[in-house]
Image (spheres, helix red, strand yellow):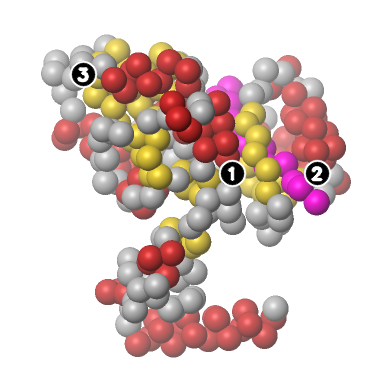
Amino acid sequence: MTLVVATLYKFVKLPDAAEKQPLLLSQCRLQGVKGTILLAEEGINGTIAGSREAIDAVLSFLRADPRLVDLEHKESVADAQPFDRMKVRLKSEIVTIGVPEADPNTQVGTYIDPKDWNAVLADPNVTVIDTRNGYEVSIGSFQGAENPQTRSFRQFPEYVRTHLNPAQHKKVALFCTGGIRCEKASAFMLAQGFEEVYHLKGGILKYLEEIPPDESLWEGECFVFDQRVAVQHGLEAGTYDLCRACGHPLSAADKASLHYEDGISCPYCIDRLTEEKRARQEARREQARRGS
């Protein structure tokens, strides 16, 4: 059976997030939906998968809250359930950047619809920045975009402080997987004095969904945080797997490397593989094999 994968987020004040958590978890389990939803006083963020009817029921449950009545979501499909279980977690932030001035409930940048994004990329006066982490950027990005080489989103503010200047970078355009990181990033940059900050509405996923491949300026695949690993144009399943030792996305060429051993190492973590770690990984792999 084909399953619907729904990605959603909204920055909205939810001071009762702790009270909503068990009710939402119960509803998701009742519908047989799996995935992860994060709740915080600043909003909601999550990806869930289930049948058409189940996803519709959960979305209706969420939108019954007047604060979430206009909650937007993006959809793709999966041939198998991409999540192992259902989690609804309470967090201090629904996407962690770690600086209080990055508050999308106060201010955000200017949204750019996917149909207008190519014109932004073509403007020589615009600095285009991929706000995702290095391992995500490594499998695909927009032509000409700057890669901050971050390992976590918490490092993005420091990248801005050391590499960008409001006096020099008059126009900045940001993009990320689904749009949520750009909300925080644009709020932070506006607070730092940047005047014109734009971000791709709906993120890369919306762009790949709406823009035909022959008009697209996207190169490669888009990393996603579920068992599909990556998606392509039209949100079709991608070609990457994950290293079960370090979590880095792996191409067919990576898996053909002498440094790749399923569950033990890959070209991206082989230099960190100690004998002690190898023993632990082998024990874990054997345990998984016996349980399957």
Q: Is residue 190 above or below residue 162?
A: above
Residue marked by disc 2: 51
Q: Which mark is residue 124?
A: 3
Q: Does 63 lie within the magenta span?
A: no
* Local crowd size for mark 2, using a 10 Å CA cut-off: few (<14), some (14–19), many (≥20): some
Residue marked by disc 1: 236
* Quadrant in the picture for residue 55: top right
Relative side of 260 to 122, left or right: right
Q: Residue at x 35, y 34 (%)?
A: 142
| Disc 2 + disc 3, Cβ < 8 Å | no
Amino acid under disc 1: Glu
Q: Residue at x 35, y 87 (%)?
A: 275
Q: Which residues are magenta?
A: 1-13
**Nearest to viewer (mark 2 / mark 3):** 3
Amino acid under disc 2: Ser
Residue that extends furthest to the left in the rendered view of this protein: 168
